[in-house]
């Protein structure tokens, strides 16, 4: 590869090994063949694609590549480094399914705004989060963030889409286990779906402390934060459930 002995080709796709012995590696400088050799190969061909880990660190990306995050059924499966004319943007997401969606990276920061009962909350597909494509999503949905560090979007109206899970927001409160149990009792809560983002406590660790009513209403409780304030939202799922990204 370094001696320039490759046959002529229009493109190459490289799937470097991401294991050293029995150990999985998580950094580009640990893959085999080494990243330097891959970049040297890319310089010899018109187009090169390199399959890498979906959690690739932004600071490890070569300067002259674009990175595509590929998602299927709500899970970010892979990332691909592209060299040459295949670079569509510096970063982008491709979401596979009944429709294939390609979303470019943010060129502006996502808008910020308030959160209130009556709104709809969207949880983006993880590939959109990895690609920094939340401004694109906000533009599609007429939505905004309520915290610039939390990848939840809110909007005044619901638009069903395949690239996000969606929930009604019926109530918003500062986090309090006592208040939450009071509201669950008042609402006749039965089956609870617990979700979180930017919240320090795993929701399942709270489940045994939550009071529910057998045969009661299915509800969703979302634990998150707004600035330094821990908040909880009570609502209902609107979209089909997809596998959750690791939190």
Image (spheres, rainbow, N blue to C red):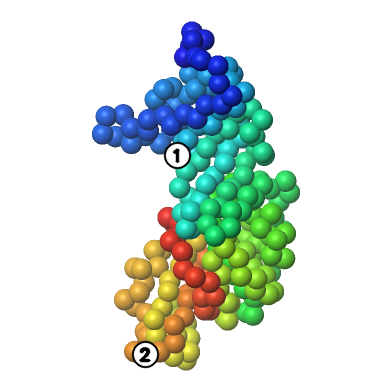
The residue nearer to you, when weighing 82 against 98, is 98
Decide if residue 228 is on the left or right side of residue 29: right
Point 44% across, 90% down: residue: 188
Give above or below for 31 relative to 241: above
Q: Which mark is residue 217?
A: none
Point 44% across, 26% down: residue: 29
Give the residue at mark 1: 53
Cα gap from disc 2 to disc 1, whole angstroms: 43 Å
The residue nearer to you, when weighing 6 against 23, is 6
Where's residue 180, x and y in %?
Answer: 46, 81
Decide if residue 237 is on the left or right side of residue 47: left
Where's residue 83, x and y in %?
Answer: 60, 28
The residue positioned farthest toward the top in the image shown: 3
Where's residue 199, x and y in %?
Answer: 47, 62
- In this orientation, does residue 170 appear? yes
Looking at the image, is mark 2 or mark 1 earlier in the sequence?
1
Q: Which image quadrant is residue 155 in?
A: bottom right
Please rate how many residues cluster around mark 2, counting C-alpha atoms within 10 Å: few if below 14, some from 14 to 19, many from 20: few
Point 43% across, 61% down: residue: 243
Dot 1: element: loop
Point 66% across, 30% down: residue: 85
Please rate how many residues cluster around mark 1, counting C-alpha atoms within 10 Å: few if below 14, some from 14 to 19, many from 20: some
Report the number of numbered marks. 2
Give above or below for 21 relative to 179: above
Dot 2: element: loop
The residue nearer to you, when weighing 51 against 12, is 12
Give the residue at mark 2: 215
Give above or below for 14 relative to 212: above
Where's residue 150, x and y in %?
Answer: 57, 58
The residue nearer to you, when weighing 226 against 57, is 57
Give above or below for 199 relative to 75: below
């Amino acid at each position: 590869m370094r001696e320039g002995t490759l046959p002529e080709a229009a493109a190459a796709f490289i799937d470097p090994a991401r294991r050293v012995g029995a150990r999985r590696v998580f950094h580009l400088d640990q893959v085999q063949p080494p990243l330097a050799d891959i970049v040297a190969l890319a310089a010899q061909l018109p187009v090169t694609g390199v399959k890498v880990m979906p959690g690739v660190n932004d600071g490890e990306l070569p300067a002259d590549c674009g990175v595509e995050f590929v998602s299927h059924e709500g899970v970010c499966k892979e990332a691909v480094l592209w060299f040459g004319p295949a670079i569509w943007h510096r970063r982008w997401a491709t979401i596979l399914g009944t429709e294939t969606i390609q979303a470019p990276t943010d060129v502006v920061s996502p808008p910020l705004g308030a959160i209130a009962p009556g709104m709809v909350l969207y949880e983006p597909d993880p590939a959109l989060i990895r690609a920094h494509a939340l401004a694109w999503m906000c533009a599609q949905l007429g939505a905004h963030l309520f915290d610039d560090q939390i990848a939840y979007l809110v909007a005044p109206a619901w638009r069903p889409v395949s690239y996000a899970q969606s929930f009604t927001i019926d109530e918003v409160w500062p986090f309090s286990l006592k208040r939450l149990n009071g509201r669950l009792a008042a609402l006749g809560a039965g089956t609870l779906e617990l979700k979180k983002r930017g919240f320090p406590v795993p929701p399942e660790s709270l489940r045994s402390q939550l009071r529910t009513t057998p045969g009661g209403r299915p509800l969703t409780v979302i634990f998150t934060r707004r600035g330094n304030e821990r908040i909880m939202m009570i609502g209902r799922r609107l979209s089909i459930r997809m596998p959750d990204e690791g939190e």
